[in-house]
Structure formats: structure tokens, C-alpha cells
Image (cartoon, grey):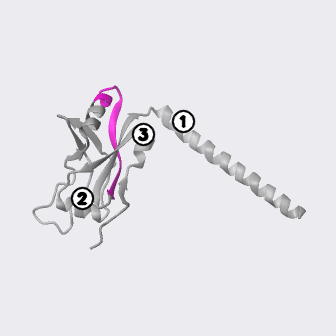
Amino acid sequence: MAKETGRKLIAQNKKARHDYHIMDTYECGLVLTGTEVKSLRQGRASLVDGFAQLDGGEAWLHNVHIPEYSQGTWTNHSARRRRKLLLHRAEIDKLIGKTQETGHTLVPLALYFKDGRAKVEIALAKGKKEYDKRQTLRERQDRRESERAMSAARRRQRACSAQRA
């Protein structure tokens, strides 16, 4: 059997980038049971309500929904159990200091397989205010409008040069 290589995305939290200012990202391993891995291989997971917490010098992932494996028996896992994150001690110590600052939290951004191992990308983030969200949307809309105007101008320029020739 060939060894798996590359990155295969399972789930991502698009809402997190909308609701938070992302300060820093970390790639973490996950401690999972067999049925959780099989369920993830089927591409089933949700990061929507998930968050990470540092507790007793360890990092834990809460509220990430990995549904029960359909062919599982009595050994099946509970869907929303807390899962241990695998980080280096220096990273955990750094995160402990940063998360104690007001308004900082740890949110999962993506869940994926990397070279056959389940990984989660967590972000040190600060919550956005409502006006920040509106401003982000406005900037995105302005960027799209300017790109449209520039491409329309290029099209007109090409049409004019084609008529001259």
C-alpha cells in the first residue's frame, strides 16, 4: 500500500476569518480514536463552534463535531468530545502568555490530513467588533469593484487597438 503524501483538506472554518483578526497560526497534531480517523477519512467534520483551550499545560480542542463512524460498534466515539492537541512545550508556553491578554482566543481554521496524519490549524485570534466586520466587507467590495473597472478599461483598450490595426 502506497504511503499518503500531501495535504487533503477535510473541513475549514470560513466564519473564523470573518469574525476574528488572525494574529498567528499553528499546526497541531490531534489525539484521535480509530473510529474518529475513519469518520474523518470519509470527509465528515465541522469546525463551526470549535475552540481550543489551554488547561494544565496542555492544549485541548473543544466542540469540534466529528460524527460517529457509520460502521462503528460499541467502540464508537462521542461526536463532540474534547480532543488533545499535540504542540511543542515552547509553543504551549507562548500561547499561554498570549491567550491571557484580553480578547485573545484560539480558534480552529482547518482540519486536514498531512502525509496521512490528522492535523488541525489553530489561530491565535482577537474578536472583531461589528464595525470591523462591516469595514472588512466594504474593503473586499471596493477591491472587487476596482478590479472590475481595471479589467473593463483593459478590454476597451484592446478593442481600440484592434480597430486601429
Q: Earlier in the sequence, mark 3 or mark 2?
A: 3
**Element type where label 3 sits in the image:** helix
In the picture, measured across the screen, residue 162 lies left or right of residue 42, that is right
C-alpha separation, residue under disc 1 versus residue under disc 2: 36 Å
Element under label 2?
Answer: loop
Q: Is residue 159 magenta?
A: no
Residue corresponding to mark 3: 19
Establish if 155 lies above or below 145: below
Q: CA distance from mark 3 to mark 1?
A: 12 Å
Q: Are marks 1 and 2 in contact (CB under 8 Å)?
A: no
Query: x%, y% of residue 18?
Result: 45, 42
Residue 47, numbered label: none
Which of the numbered marks, if any, corresponds to residue 67?
2
The answer to if 99 sits in the magenta stretch is: yes
Task: Judge left or right: residue 161 versus residue 94.
Answer: right
Q: CA distance from mark 3 to mark 2?
A: 25 Å
Quadrant location, the N terminus: bottom left
- Circle 1: element type: helix
Place of residue 75 in the rendered image (x, y in percent of width and height, measured from the top left): 11, 61
Name the residue rendered at 25%, 46% in the picture. Answer: 63
Q: Is residue 82 above or below residue 56?
A: below
Task: Give residue 122's position: percent from left, percent from top.
Answer: 34, 44
Q: Which residue is mark 1?
A: 135
Region of the chain picked out in magenta, as a range: 97-113
